[in-house]
Image (cartoon, rainbow, N blue to C red):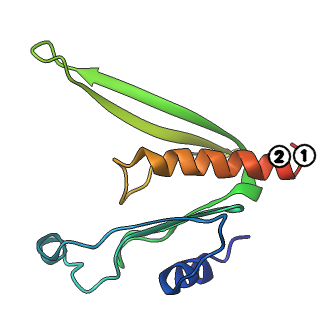
């Protein structure tokens, strides 16, 4: 089981192990004020060899993906275009299949537009499975 609070604490204090990926950004003052989160810590996503932990704000629970609980992970994408435009809006996420039969959709709440978060999660899960021989 992942010790999510310790992982977030260590990532905020620094330094972190070389095999961790840390994503953070400053919470905008206006956005924080409008959403009632101006005194919250900045959003933080940490991907470790054993899973991922994301802090969005004090009102939302931590998001934890524990690789030991997963049976499979599948990359998904969906595109939407409009007839009057050559642009395509692309949504990318990961479907998580848990050993106990649960299913979940994962996309970072705070870093949804940063595809490096999804890439980092998939890479870490692949390495995790390889180390366990599965």
Residue 62 appears at what percent x and percent y? Answer: 49, 70
Residue 133's disc number = 1
Q: Quadrant of the C terminus?
A: top right
Furthest-right residue in this view = 133
SS for tag 1? loop
Q: CA distance from mark 2 to mark 1?
A: 5 Å
User: Badge 1, how many Cα within 10 Å: few under 14, some, many 20+?
Assistant: few
The residue positioned 69% from the left and 49% from the top of the image is 125
Nearer to the camera, 103 or 15: 15
The residue positioned 51% from the left and 46% from the top of the image is 118
The quadrant in which residue 51 appears is bottom right
Q: Quadrant of the N terminus?
A: bottom right
Q: Are marks 2 and 1 in contact (CB under 8 Å)?
A: yes
Residue 73 appears at what percent x and percent y? Answer: 65, 40
Furthest-top residue in this view = 83
Q: Quick check: 2 left or right of 44?
A: right
The quadrant in which residue 115 appears is top left
The residue positioned 47% from the left and 40% from the top of the image is 93
Residue holding disc 2: 130
């Amino acid at each position: 089981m992942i010790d999510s609070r310790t992982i977030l604490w260590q990532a905020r204090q620094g330094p972190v192990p070389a095999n961790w990926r840390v994503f953070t950004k400053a919470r905008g003052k206006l956005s924080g004020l409008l959403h009632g989160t101006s005194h919250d810590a900045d959003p933080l996503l940490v991907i470790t060899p054993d899973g991922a932990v994301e802090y969005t704000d004090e009102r939302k629970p931590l998001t934890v993906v524990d690789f030991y609980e997963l049976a499979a992970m599948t990359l998904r994408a969906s595109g939407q275009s409009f007839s009057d435009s050559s642009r395509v809006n692309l949504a990318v996420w990961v479907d998580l299949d848990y050993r106990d039969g649960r299913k979940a959709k994962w996309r970072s709440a705070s870093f949804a537009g940063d595809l490096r978060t999804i890439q980092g999660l998939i890479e870490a899960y692949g390495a995790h499975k390889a180390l366990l021989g599965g």
